[in-house]
Image (cartoon, helix red, strand yellow):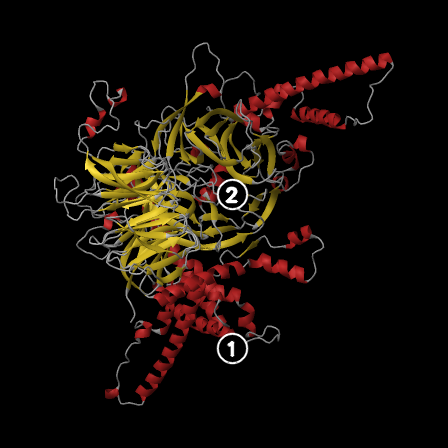
Amino acid sequence: MQHTYLRYECADAFSLTTSSSTTSTLTTSPLTFLNNNARSTGSKSSSTNTSSGKSSSSSSSTSILLSTAGSQIIGYNLRTNEPCLKIGHRELLSGGLGTGKALNSNEVLCITTRSTGNTNGGGGGGTVHSKVATGWKDGSVRIFDIHDMDIGNSASASTTKPGLVHSLLFESDSHDDRTNEEFIMRDPLVLNGHNNSSVTCLAFDETNNGNSNNKRDSTNNDSTSSVGRERGQSASQLLASGSSDGRIILWDIIAETGLFRLIGHKGPITDLSFSYLESHGDGSVRGRGVRVRSSSEMVLLSSSLDGLVKIWNIESQCCVQTIANHNGQVTCSSVVSLIHNVSNPNSDVDDNDDDDDDGDNSNATVGHRSRFITGCIDGKVRVWSMHSSKRMVESSVSASTALTTGSENAGQDGDINQDDTCTYMGTLPLPPNTISNEKIQSIQYHTITDANDDETSFIGILRSNTKHVDVYRIRSFSDTMKKKVRRLRRKREKHSVKQQKQKSEQEENQSAGRGKKRGLLEDDDDEEENEDNGVDELLGAAGGGDDGQLGRNEDYIKASDEFEYIGTVRSSHKIKAFTFSPHKNRSGSIRLVLSLSTNALETHSITQSPKKDGEKQSTASEYDTNLISTLDMYGHPSGIRSIALSSDDTFACTVSKNVAKVWNVTNRSCIRSLTLSSSKIKSKKASFYGLCVTFLPGDTHFVLGTREGHLLIVDIASGDIVYFEEKAHEKEIWSIDLKNPKSNNSMLDNDENRSAITIMTGSADKSVKFWEIERQGNNTSDNDDDSDDDYDIDGESKFNQYQNHPMLVHVRTLQTTDDVVACRYSYDTTKRMVFVSTLDSQIKVFFDDTLKFFLSLYGHSLPALAIDASDDDTLLASGGADKSIKIWGLDFGDTHRTLYGHSDSITDLKFVKKTHNFFTCSKDTTVRYWDADRFEQILLLTGHSSEINCLSLSKTGAFVLSGGMDRQVRVWERTRDMVFLEEEKERELEAAFDNVDGKDDKGTEHILRSRGRNEGDDDDDNEGDENLPQSEAAVRRSVLSVSSGDRIMEALERADEELKEIALFNSSQKMKNAEDRTNRTPNFMLLGMQPSAYILWVLRGIKSTELEQSLLILPLSHIERLIYYLIVLLRKGQGVEICSRAAICLIKSHQNQIIFGGSGSSGRKNSDMSVPLRELRRLLKVRLGEARDTVGYNIAAMRMVIRVTNERKSQYHIPDRNEGPADIWKGLDRL
């Protein structure tokens, strides 16, 4: 007889603020900001993009910080320091299993956002639409659409915190209104192309944002405006994703497809950044006042752990420059885009002139500066100047103008590659009194705008394993040129002094008639001569001794000229990630949000301090740093060691190092966060490491055991430690269990007949101690002598405030032969037993009343870390460090069965009440559901990213809580979906097939490399690498694409059978009389549709990203049939878009097979397909032309609506009562 099981699925997760420190994959973008209002875009990236280190401050006052937290993205309102948004993804199991509403079991690694502005196309008041792109550990990219109404509902002050809870228990109860409590789990756009490689970084093409509200656009010159229009009119939105296998994929999120894959890096991608290269370099005015029209070239910059930085041309899909002079791995990078005003070249730059160039200057024009900043494992931050290649500049302007547009440092570097787009500017100077060679972990870029519309840019540098962030300010263009002039002047003076010294020495030597003696091992002074020649060339190219000429020349700018250190932000713990806040302050201060290794967030501000009169201050002392707020309420600082549920399953207590937290399980909110410390302890160490916890009857207190051997009783209402038992055990307390009284009276009721409440604790000091719960009286001091520490200032005893609270009284002790690792009570009140697991791999059973030995259970090769008995006391299950589960009979102590399934030590085990089913958790990051009667595994639950330490089950078995070293608590809820063991086994095999298939499919590069090795063409590896392709198809085959291809083939076969049956039915009807003819019953296998309509329904059911790979699986016979149905659909005008896409994909991919009928080598064409292909071509032209005309007509109509609306807003109109409604479509034919 088949037994019936109900499925458990992960509904939610909590207790994780940020997961930046738990993931082993390198990622630099776990934080970003989501703004409620649309933000303007100019020539720089103004949307937040932490993967490339860019952000802007032109946001609303309510900015939401998004943080990756396991399988979710949590949004925090930094004004209230509370979570206000949760974003998750439903996990769809293969084969249609499950409810389809479970939380995804994978982990989010990186995140970036993009604001698309107001949906009404005008000013404020519209609905804001933001896109949140997330990179996952399974290699997928998911893009969520967030509206301002989502944030508004979830940020409302409510007890149940709507928008932060997702439950599967009441999903079908219509009387229970829980629709508002579900957090955002709408179906995102899923892009699969990285196979099983983790997505480590993401980057939006911010310059394609359609908004153009920036005030600077109206003052730009014609060339800059043309570039902005050129970028803004793009019909696509690009997203770049990099993975741990060194591959970069470019996605078109409007067409929902992958464009191409870039191949070249050999290590994980650490950062991606989009940028546009201006053909005129730095500034629009060059040389003799010639105004060069700007033309942009779109590039993608990527950094990798292979030590290379590559610059990719998006249009040609190839690498145009590789920077390989980093001393090790490149861990992060960022692109800084700046706008500055360039003065007329006829005006000189005075070193002492304090006037800025940002004023109203009719001779000034707008220039651009682009800097590429890279962080390396050697601890150095390198700066590169970005510009178009010299070859492009020379081809677009005259030769005289091109000579004055040389790249920076040209005189120093000599002959430069004509195709280089980046020029080295130097390294950022270290802060004063700082010597650090720690690797650079993150680089972030931020720009603020003051009331005068003047921009100031900052960059933040975070080093690995440090507690500080160094902040630099980017000087304005005029200040940069002044700094350069001063540096070159000092270099010129030093050079002149050195030349005079050398000349005097030569004259002295000549007059003495002798030369300088040189040793045998000394080299010639070639390096000094080369250096001197370089200085001469530098000063000569820069304008000789004229300071004005030096100031007008924009070349030879060093990184030290442009960046200045202003201060350091210091935190209380190590920083794992940071980002700049878009908060706009009138005082011009900036804010940084730090993600700490303790699962907390800190907000710091950097404010410019006013100068005192007559006091000259350095730049670093002009800025003050202050801690604004700390958010550590909703996360544990370390791994969770124990979980306990209250008697009514309402509250949950979680314990970790130095912290215990009490949660409301219903709304996932933290109601109490307690620091485990006590002033009563006699030793110096005041903080404790919690290992085990249990609630006392009444659910008002809980007892906690620590690694130091102490026992604590904590009052939940006040958060105070009401009782402290110092050194209850000499060593660690590993286990604690509660024996409930026989009656249901409260813990503090005066009932003499009621049995005492007993707590059992097992420790590594080879003892099991039993404690009774009593009420504290007025005299409960541990010492007989009254100490001064026991009284407060008023002379009142400190223990009086805790009277009527529970306390522990030691009653008896059970000594064991080895350390105790676990202990449990049985459930039978008539024959209570005690189960003790020791370090010698034995499980001993004692009677509770007399502590007499009953049974000794042998079988584990390593200690049993978790034991539990069924509620009928017939079975005992134990899980050990030997990865095995043993089921024992308590009648005779025999072993019923040994179960295997976990790949690491089993840490906890719990039986479901009134059943023989139990849950186990392990260090292999999985939770498994077992049947102890049939000795089978029922379910495998995955979702944790690190080892799991503890489990806790509700009294009814409705949900399970699991906590681990990843510092999150996952809620597994029982659904109404039935579990069939055969389907579960098939699903595990499919998952294994997907992993193996992903490893075997290595792409075009692997095929060409293997072909070259087979042909013996491996003489020159470098030459072979140059011949390899630099791009390939973006999407690869997966289990979803294979199943989708099978669905298409099955649909084609059903449609063909239906056509045959329709033909037979029509022929039989013709032979009948008119009165005997009947209508044919629709085929329920085709859902009552016609064959062509059924094919269209199947094609629309396939995800857009999987369509091309699904079509590649079809054999030639099915391709011909699909082309036939596409022709039928196009004739009817149905599904024009998807039919056109499928037809083009089939023709491009299977051209030879379609033309030659599968015999390409014979050279004989397939004449049967010529007529259908001509008809398909004709229909595609007709239908796509109609669609184009429809779209063009609609666009023209919307432009007309916008024009009429703007006219009505600008004019004061008094409506006439006799006047009818205005025809806004009048004159549309003239467009």
- Specify which label sits upstream in the sequence, 2 or 1: 2
- The answer to whether 1195 appears left or right of 809 in the picture is right
Q: Position of residue 589 (x, y in %)?
A: 39, 26
Asked whether the beta carbons under mark 2 and mark 1 sit within 8 Å of each other, the answer is: no
Residue under numbered circle 1: 1168
Q: Position of residue 321 (x, y in %)?
A: 61, 43
Nearer the observer: mark 2 or 1; the answer is 2
Q: Is residue 605 above or below residue 663?
A: above
Residue 118, visible in the rendered structure: no
Q: Residues within 10 Å of mark 2 (few under 14, many from 20)?
A: many
Question: Which residue sits at x=53%, y=17%?
Answer: 353
Residue under numbered circle 2: 270
The front one of 221 and 316 is 316
**What element does badge 1 sit on?**
helix
Q: Quadrant of residue 501?
A: top right
Q: Quadrant of the N terminus?
A: bottom left
Residue 981, visible in the rendered structure: yes
Q: Position of residue 37 (x, y in %)?
A: 34, 38
Q: Quadrant of residue 1050?
A: bottom left
Q: Position of residue 1076 (x, y in %)?
A: 24, 88
**How far is disc 2 from disc 1 in space, using C-alphas?**
52 Å
The front one of 125 and 62 is 62
For badge 2, the amino acid type reads: Thr
Q: Residues within 10 Å of mark 1 (few under 14, many from 20)?
A: few
For badge 1, the amino acid type reads: Asp
The front one of 897 and 1144 is 897
The front one of 455 and 935 is 935
Tell me, for residue 32, which label it has, or none.
none
Residue farthest to the top, as pictured: 614
Q: Is residue 340 above or below residue 263?
A: above
**What element does badge 2 sit on?**
strand
Q: Is residue 701 above or below residue 484?
A: below
